[in-house]
Image (cartoon, rainbow, N blue to C red):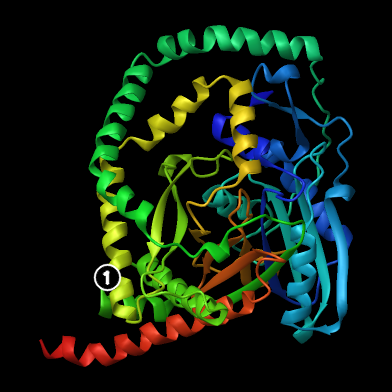
Amino acid sequence: MDRLSATDAGFYYAETENAPLHVGSVAVFEGPAPSYGDLVRLLLSKLPQVPRYRQRVREVPLNLGRPLWVDDPHFQILYHVRHTAVPKPGGTEQLRNLAGRVLGQRLDMAKPLWEVWLVEGLEDDRWAIISKVHHCMVDGVAGTDLMQIMFDLDPNAEQAAPRDWSPQRTPSSLAMVAGALTETATAPLRQLVHSPDAVATGAKGLVSSARAAVSTVPQLARQALTPLARTLTGPIGPHRRWAWSDARFEDLRTARAALGGTVNDIVLTAITGGFRELLKGRGALGADTVVRTMVPISVRKEGERGSLDNRVTAVFVDLPVGEADPLARLASIRSQMDEYKRTMQAVDARSIISMGDYVAPTLLAMGVRAAMQTGQMWCQAVTTNVPGPRVPLYVLGKRMVSAHPYVPIAGGTRISIGIFSYLNEMTFGINADFDGFPDVDVLSEGICRGIAELVELAAAKQPVTAAR
């Protein structure tokens, strides 16, 4: 049995009827599609590598401790692996609509928190896999690692035979309470014994965080006075609109080389252009308006790739949608990201995150749920960029041709943009509240135009750069 970390428990507690907190993706493959039985057998052969996929979350009575991962004695893979199809020949719109319905539905919180859907009927003899996994189990970077469970680098890779599995006994409620109380009493002492510098490191992290916070007070004050795009936040309903855009990674790198900054800066600038078009269409665009987006940042070390828990922090970036000049938008975003990088270097984010393990579990549960129910007005979007593999991936010998990410929305933030790169493509998966974003396609198409605009400016600048 493993206990959820404070961050993972926060994602678990934040789940509500109208805010399912799973991440997901839609992967499209060259055909013909494998049989449902072949996909089931493949996943069964891979499950020993990820025991978590046969485990469910069990809450400690009265929230006296953080929840536990326990083996599901009734685990049945046929429940988690589903089979469906779109009417032939299914195009992009049909796949998007199906995926939007599937990804918008909650996972059963009483079972292992994942689903895989085999989708047939796509045009050009293609098929797809829709996958869902709860955020309490995995963050975006670990999610990319999880692709190695069912994906192969070699189309002729041999698959192991499924193995028998027996669940461990589920602890009683009394045992869970006793274990939680014992851990609460002894965890700080064990931490000191096994890592004498842990508390000091955490304290130093908090001190450095306080110093960094003081240095960012002027920035926070500016953000507090900045006119935000209020039409983007509000109550979240049970239904979702989902759209996606595609871009060539080479175009983004060309723009970065000519205009400066990072690829992520270029991406955020293109997204700014998309939001600008959306707000202009709503008649809600002012000269000083910004869209504040939360940008998650992984603090996972290289040696920790493959671990399934969440190791992330976040920064808030003001997208200058009111600015008409795309180069000025890029300069603003680049300046903010550079400042955040300097701040993050001064803060031991990992130590601060680990200090959450000392928060009383009952207070953690109450605090997260209250925050999700009351909503917030500080940020209007979530934008997360997860680098994917630059080599082809295969499932049962079939090559994946594209992948589109799905990031949840919650807490009054009614839109999220997941960004995923694969081979020479970068895809933007846009998840939005159904009632709040009837115009989500305006944003999707605007991102494409924003990228094209930056590529055009880069092409115009290259001769000047060469002349120097």
Task: Identify which residue is drawn at 62% across, 68% down.
Answer: 404
Relative vertical location of residue 335 with respect to residue 456 in this rendering, above or below = above
Q: SS at mark 1? A: helix
Relative vertical location of residue 352 with respect to residue 445 in this rendering, above or below = above
Furthest residue in direction left, as rendered: 468
Task: Identify which residue is drawn at 36% across, 67% down.
Answer: 265
Which one is nearer the viewer's eye here, 71 or 207? 207
Image x and y of residue 410, in percent? 63, 50
Which one is nearer the viewer's eye here, 269 or 349? 269
Which one is nearer the viewer's eye here, 343 or 275? 275
Residue 44 seen in the current view: yes
Task: Identify which residue is drawn at 82% across, 33% down.
Answer: 165
Identify the residue under disc 1.
331
Relative vertical location of residue 271 with respect to residue 83 in this rendering, above or below = below
Image x and y of residue 127, in percent? 77, 74
* Quarter placement of the C terminus: bottom left
Relative vertical location of residue 397 with respect to residue 292 in this rendering, above or below = below
- State left or right for residue 66 relative to residue 57: left
Q: Amino acid at mark 1?
A: Ala
Density class for disc 1 (Cα within 10 Å; few <14, some 14-19, many ≥20) is some
Q: Determine the image quadrant of residue 164.
A: top right
- State left or right for residue 224 relative to residue 204: right
Task: Identify which residue is drawn at 28% across, 44% down.
Answer: 217
Image x and y of residue 324, in percent? 35, 81
* Quarter placement of the N terminus: top right
Residue 4 seen in the current view: no
Image x and y of residue 77, in percent? 85, 46
- State left or right for residue 148 relative to residue 219: right
Q: Determine the image quadrant of residue 52.
A: top right
Q: Determine the image quadrant of residue 455.
A: bottom left
